[in-house]
Image: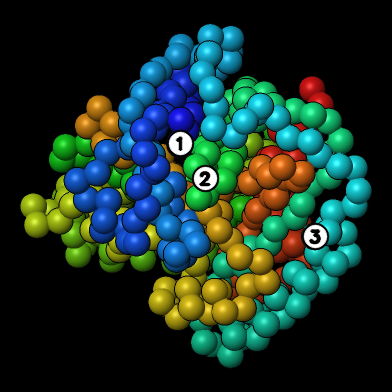
Amino acid sequence: MTGFALFRLPHEQQVTMVAQTEGEPLELASCEDLNGQTGFVVAPFAVSAGTPIVLIKPDIVKTFPSVSEFVSDVNIQFPWGKLSVSLGGTASSLGGNSNRTTYSDDFSRFFLHLNNGDFRKLVLSRCAEEPVTEHVSPLELYQRACLLYPRLFISLVYTAKSGLWLTATPEILLEGRGDEWRTIALAGTMKLNGDDLLGEGENLTWSTKNIQEQRYVATYLKECLEQLADNIQEEGPRTVRAANLVHLRSDFTFTILNNARVGNVLQLLHPTPAVCGLPKKEAYDFILANEHTPRLYYSGFMGPLNLSSTTHLFVSLRCMQITDNQYRLYAGGGLLKDSVEEQEWQETEAKMETMRRVLKTQ
């Protein structure tokens, strides 16, 4: 087996396994190369020779009623060996004060260009290595994530090129079949506390900064869709919950024009301002040149492409890369010219908590 993916859609129980048994997963240089393809897609934030778009061919596709039944029934040789990682208990080389200092340096550099009016929005991300002392199976981590986060898209994906990633994300990039497609504009973040954890965030009041950030994303998506789609309908924004966070979400439904295909839509949409910035091309180039830690497959997208004629592609948020000796957690946040550094840092901490909860001994 050369590539493997497990995924569970939001608000569903069943888990689907996609595995490639012959040859290496396909490596693609652009989203447009996905036109006419079928399989499980793992796409990076920035496509390069080191981080190509990877497509796991569906030599095996099998659906299980629940994650627990998958874990108890599966009897295959996984490509990452004995399916466990040995993690040391030493302090993280990216953690503590060094990580905070690096973030402060990046924030100052980003904020300077926002304050100068060079950008309307920039997304600043960071990575932290989480010290864990237990031996744990990635399948166990996946099962924990499914149980903790019923509202999210949960995936566990491995290829030799991308490595092993666990993702629990709320953000749809593109999904649909036939003539019926949809995407969402998801931006703005608040953490739920106290009695608010009992609800869906319906009593919270959004700040002007969060409302403006979400509107930037929604406007961008609509402008993109008008180039390749018809019958565009927008609903929202509304407050939606993802783990212990809430976001502002607008939903778009549309029909892809006859002269366009799914890969063309993806090429136009990705990366959205929710993970990049505005203006998009300039923000994208600035992030690649100035962000301290390469994002790799964080803030890219992944999911089944044209499996059973249906596509479910999600932005790779709330994710971590699992290596032989560490977990690398990723998170980011949208910066505007009125952003406050400590508030933005705390937002990334809250987002990383989604994966940190998965790592805690149950």
- Alpha carbon separation for disc pair 1 and 2: 7 Å
Q: Residue furthest front?
A: 23
Residue assigned mark 2: 160
Which numbered disc, 1 or 3, marks the residue closer to the eye?
Answer: 1
Q: Residue at the location (72% across, 42% down)?
A: 324
Q: Position of residue 335 (x, y in %)?
A: 61, 70
Q: Residue at the location (19% across, 46% down)?
A: 36
Kindly indicate whether the residue at mark 2 contacts the one at mark 3 (C-beta within 8 angstroms): no
Q: Position of residue 294 (x, y in %)?
A: 61, 65
Q: Residue furthest bottom?
A: 116
Disc 1 is placed on an element classified as loop
What amino acid does circle 2 point to?
A: Ala
What amino acid does circle 1 point to?
A: Thr
- Is residue 12 left or right of 83 when viewed as pictured? left
**Looking at the rendering, in which quadrant would you find the C terminus?**
top right
Q: Residue at the location (54% across, 74% down)?
A: 288
Query: Which of marks 3 and 1 precedes in the sequence?
Result: 1
Q: Position of residue 304 (x, y in %)?
A: 36, 36
Query: Which of marks 2 and 3 precedes in the sequence?
Result: 3
Q: Judge whether residue 291 can be spotted in this image.
A: yes
Q: Judge whether residue 249 can be spotted in this image.
A: no
Disc 2 is placed on an element classified as loop
- Alpha carbon separation for disc pair 3 and 2: 24 Å
Q: Residues within 10 Å of mark 2 (few under 14, many from 20)?
A: few
- Is residue 279 left or right of 294 when viewed as pictured? left
* Residue 131: mark: none
* Residue 2: mark: 1
Query: Which of marks 2 and 1 precedes in the sequence?
Result: 1
- Alpha carbon separation for disc pair 1 and 3: 31 Å
Above or below: residue 82 compared with residue 271: above
